[in-house]
Amino acid sequence: MKRTTPTSTTPPGRRADELLERARIAYVKAGGREQPSDASEVREINGATIITLTNVNGVLATYRVDGDMIKRITDLSRYDMAFADRREFVTAVVHLFGKAGHPTVAAHTVATQQKLIAAAVAGGFKDADVLTRYVERGALTTTALELAFDAIECAGGADACWDTIEVDTMLASAFHDLRAPRSDEYKAGARAALQFRVDGTTITRPYPVGSAGDDAFDGGMAEGHAIWRHAIAAGAEFSATGRLPRQDHATGAA
């Protein structure tokens, strides 16, 4: 994931000292025994006030100022990365919440949402029901974005989610309602080829060699590689001319 240097400043000395003392008291009340050192600091990171208590062994605890209270946090990444540069995260959130557009696109988006949430649950995400309610309302509140961030992390990180979205998007574009239906075996072959192209996932052949299912899977793999080549060509042409190549809606090929 692309990371950027955070926008970080240090508050005036007196306020910083007061915040550090509040954080020290909170740390002791929570059972902490080691005292912070002079390296402890208060920073304004992308609009959030972050207090970091440290000693010679490293970081003891990190807190965020929330109104009149301070709250302990365990993950600084949502604060020390500029939101505009988190392409993978932003894309994943859009897929979690976006429902606009053609019904076929909306159906694909919902299917991807469900897949990402299922992966998050498998990774230990506990608030799937709450996030799903936000998804159903399309509510992009601060709480919803925090939940989406946690879900993406539990699903394997933003890069893994982007890979899932990218493969699903290419498949949805290729196997649209205007072309003749293809078998599940054929689509599985196309997905396997695209997954290999996107993130290097090893292709395994799930059907007996020489069977009808294997033949369909093989044909799907050939199309999957063709879809990938078309996507690469489309990206190159768009970068050079601002236009996408014409797509044959009967086959999905260029």
Image (spheres, rainbow, N blue to C red):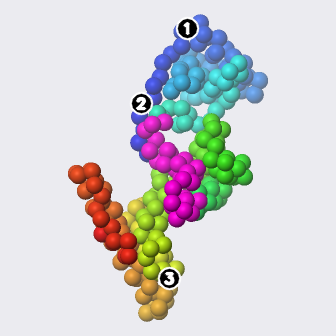
Q: Residue furthest top?
A: 14
Which numbered dot is residue 5? 2
- How far, Cα to Cα, is label 2 from label 3? 48 Å
Q: Amino acid at mark 1?
A: Gly
Which numbered dot is residue 13? 1
Residue 84 part of the magenta-drawn span: yes
- How far, Cα to Cα, is label 1 from label 2? 23 Å
Q: Kindly report the secondary structure that dominates the magenta region of the rendered protein.
A: helix
Name the residue at 48% across, 72% down: 177
On screen, residue 253 versus residue 92, left or right, reads left
Is 138 in front, or is 193? 138
Name the residue at 48% across, 18% down: 9
* Mark whose residue sits in front, 1 or 3: 3
User: Dividing the image into 4 quarters, which one contains the N terminus?
Assistant: top left
Residue located beneath label 3 in the image: 183
* Mark whose residue sits in front, 2 or 3: 3
Instruction: Read off the magenta span.
Output: 83-110
Q: Is residue 110 among the parts visible in the rendering?
A: yes
